[in-house]
Image: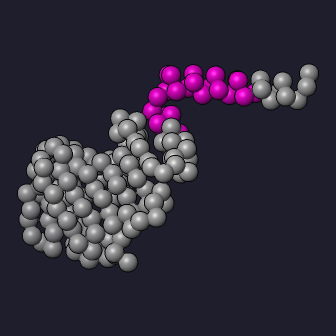
Amino acid sequence: MCIWQFDFRIYVLTYVFIQYVCLFFPLFCLPLQYHCNRMNQRDMPYIKRQLDRVAPIPTSHGIGVKQVLLAGDETSSAVTQVAKSSLIKGEKVEEHIHPTMDEHYLCFSGEGILWVDHQRIAFTKDTYVLVKAGSSHSLEATTDVSFLTIGIATE
């Protein structure tokens, strides 16, 4: 048996195994698909993501989940991240500050209270809020809430 045949058999077995795992354990494969999509799109002149194919991951604040549509290392701009985030009623992102990043919020659905420098802002469907760098802010979900966040580095 030549080396090529051996390598090809390993390739086929690996491919079949991955397809089997993805068929019966789809949540296992979502992060793998996200990583493969990121690698494939690095050399392209654009990045396209389907939200239903982006795996939800925990937020950096440890509350809620997010689906990262664009990470900072995928662009040469000042964008640090674009993500759809979700909080369940009663969840609260504790007060924090981003010293060198503006954070843009756009509410898709639900309701919450966004506190910016101790000022209360109603966060409801179709509401856009810019939290400027250096401002303390927190977000509390009064219902299940879904929103877009865009981070832009200021320095």
Extreme residue in the front direction: 45
Q: Is residue 116 above or below residue 13?
A: below
Residue 147: give x, y in percent of width and height: 22, 49
Position of residue 133 in the picture relative to residue 40 (left or right): left
In front: 17, or 94?
17
x, y percent for residue 4: 85, 28
Is the magenta region chiefly helix, strand or loop? helix
User: Is 18 within the magenta?
Assistant: yes
Which residue is rendered at x = 36% and y = 70% of the image?
Answer: 153
Quarter of the figure with the C terminus: bottom left
Q: Residue reaching furthest right?
A: 1
Where is residue 33 drawn, in percent x and y? 50, 38
Residue at x-position 30% and y-position 59%: 150
Mark yes or no: residue 142 visible.
no
The span shown in magenta is 10-32
Please tell me which residue lies in front, 103 or 113: 103
**Does residue 43 appear to the left or right of 119 in the view shown?**
right
> Where, by quadrant of the figure, is residue 95 drawn?
bottom left
Residue found at x 24% / y 61%: 104
Q: Nearer the viewer, residue 115 or 100?
A: 100
